Image: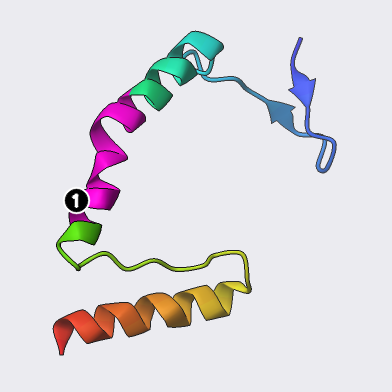
Amino acid sequence: MFLQCDNCEGNLFQRKDDNEEIIRKRLEEYQEKTAPLISYYNDKGVLSEIEVEGELSQNVKDTLEILDSLVN
């Protein structure tokens, strides 16, 4: 039996690696390997942050401005 999407009533599938144990491992790996890069690049003065809670068009504009400043 398949679960159905509430929106389109299509069949929903769950990935084999979509379980609590795997997700916990991914989060641990992120904390160990990726999260430290935030302070590393911030300390070097090359970290840019974008507030992404606004409109998509504003997020794109902000991203392009940062990328433009890196190229020029």
Q: Which corner quadrant of the image does residue 56 belong to?
A: bottom right
Which residue position is annotated with label 1?
40
In the rendered view, does 68 fall on the left or right side of 16?
Answer: left
Please say if 23 is above or below 70.
above
Please say if 62 is above or below 8.
below
Q: Position of residue 11 (x, y in %)?
A: 72, 27
Q: Quadrant of the N terminus?
A: top right
Please say if 18 is above or below 47.
above
Q: Is residue 37 magenta?
A: yes
Identify the residue at horizontal 42%, vertical 26% (top origin).
27
Identify the residue at horizontal 35%, vertical 84% (top origin).
65
Give SS at disc 1.
helix
Q: Nearer the viewer, residue 8 or 38?
A: 38
In the rendered view, does 52 fall on the left or right side of 68?
Answer: right
Identify the residue at horizontal 44%, vertical 14% (top origin).
22
Q: Amino acid at mark 1?
A: Tyr
Q: Residue lying furthest front in this view?
A: 43
Q: Nearer the viewer, residue 10 or 14?
A: 14
Please say if 16 is above or below 62.
above
In the rendered view, does 22 fall on the left or right side of 37?
Answer: right
Q: Which residues are magenta?
A: 29-41
Q: Position of residue 44 (x, y in %)?
A: 14, 62
Q: Position of residue 28 (x, y in %)?
A: 37, 22
Mark 1, Cα crowd under 10 Å, few <14 / some 14-19 / many 20+, is few
Q: Quadrant of the C terminus?
A: bottom left
Q: Position of residue 40 (x, y in %)?
A: 19, 50
Q: Magenta-highlighted stretch: main secondary structure? A: helix
